[in-house]
Image (cartoon, rainbow, N blue to C red):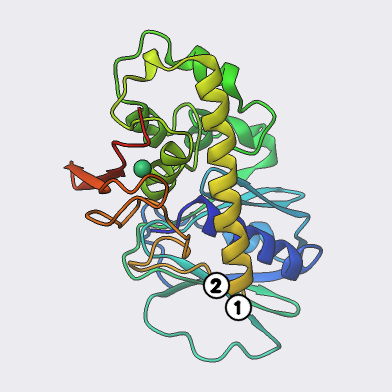
Amino acid sequence: MPELPEVEVVRRGLAAQLRGGTLRRVRVREPRLRWAVPEGLDAALAESRLESVGRRGKYLLLRFAQGWLIVHLGMSGSLRFLPGASAGMAGAHDHVDFVFGHGVLRLHDPRRFGAVLWHPAHAGAIECHPLLAGLGVEPFSDRFDAALLHRATRGRRASTKQLLLAGKIVVGVGNIYACESLFRAAIRPSTAAGRIGLARYGRLAACIRETLSEAIERGGSTLRDFVGSGGESGYFQLDCDVYGRAGDACRRCGAIVRVDREHARATYWCAGCQH
Ligand SMILES: [Zn+2]
């Protein structure tokens, strides 16, 4: 599943290739994605200039004067920009084409858990869209810091890792990033979130930013044509300290890296380093 770093790399690629471009038409071959692609997109957006490309969580926000296109890659979606007049034949699972003056942006999504939605400007600020309003803060925003993590977790018995994954406090910390960030911050994943103090949360916030930044850097250097990869890979090739290393020696202390499996999610951690 594309995670926040991948979506951010896609966003940067889209911005570089498409910002300021004119959308000529929208061609929907298969509207049955996670939610139906709204009818009338073509009429609403034909000959409109793309003003900016934003992101909130894993939602891409394509801003036009009339409103926002919201695009989500779901489990297996990818976007590919095909420059030039001829985009070639659409293949299986190529569900939507956004035809720009200088090329075609094509949404490919075999499992169809992705989404293309429309939020007209007259409906109000994009932040208030029902899919976005309940999201936690962005990990790179000024609002994400020790005080926020501390405040949001007082009295919470859920594990620190569980609260990170839930996305209500901060978005974008998927399983691998939670495992790696908690290792770097020396916090045991199962520790009740309410028991972690302000200073440790300060360290965790910094480690989350660092881990996500590294993934974005790696993604930016390996991606071509800013295709948002889908399929099973899910994550950029992060140089992991604990994730996927169960049974190996911890690089920091030499203890054996452990794995706990719960709800089909594996938590990797080191009992020597994380307390
Ligand atoms: Zn260790």
Whole-percent x, y for residue 225 in the image:
62, 77
Q: Is residue 46 left or right of residue 200?
A: right
Location of the C terminus by quadrant is: top left
Q: Residue at x 71, y 87 (%)?
A: 84
Residue marked by disc 2: 227
Give the residue displayed 67% in from the left and 33% down from the top.
125
Identify the element where label 2 is drawn.
Answer: loop
Indicate the quadrant where residue 139 lies.
top right
Tell me which residue sits at (33%, 49%) in the image: 254
* Amino acid under disc 1: Arg
Q: Quadrant of residue 232?
A: bottom left
> In the structure shown, which secondary structural element does the residue marked by tag 1 occupy?
loop
> Mark 1 — residue?
224
What percent of the width, then of the height, locates residue 221? 63, 71
Q: What amino acid is found at the position of numbered circle 2 in the picture?
A: Val
Which disc number belongs to residue 24? none
Q: Foreground: 264 or 47?
A: 264
Q: Nearer the viewer, residue 86 or 200?
A: 200
Which residue appears at 42% of the width and 10% of the height? Answer: 154
Residue count near mark 2 (Cα–Cα under 10 Å), binned few <14, some 14–19, many ≥20: many
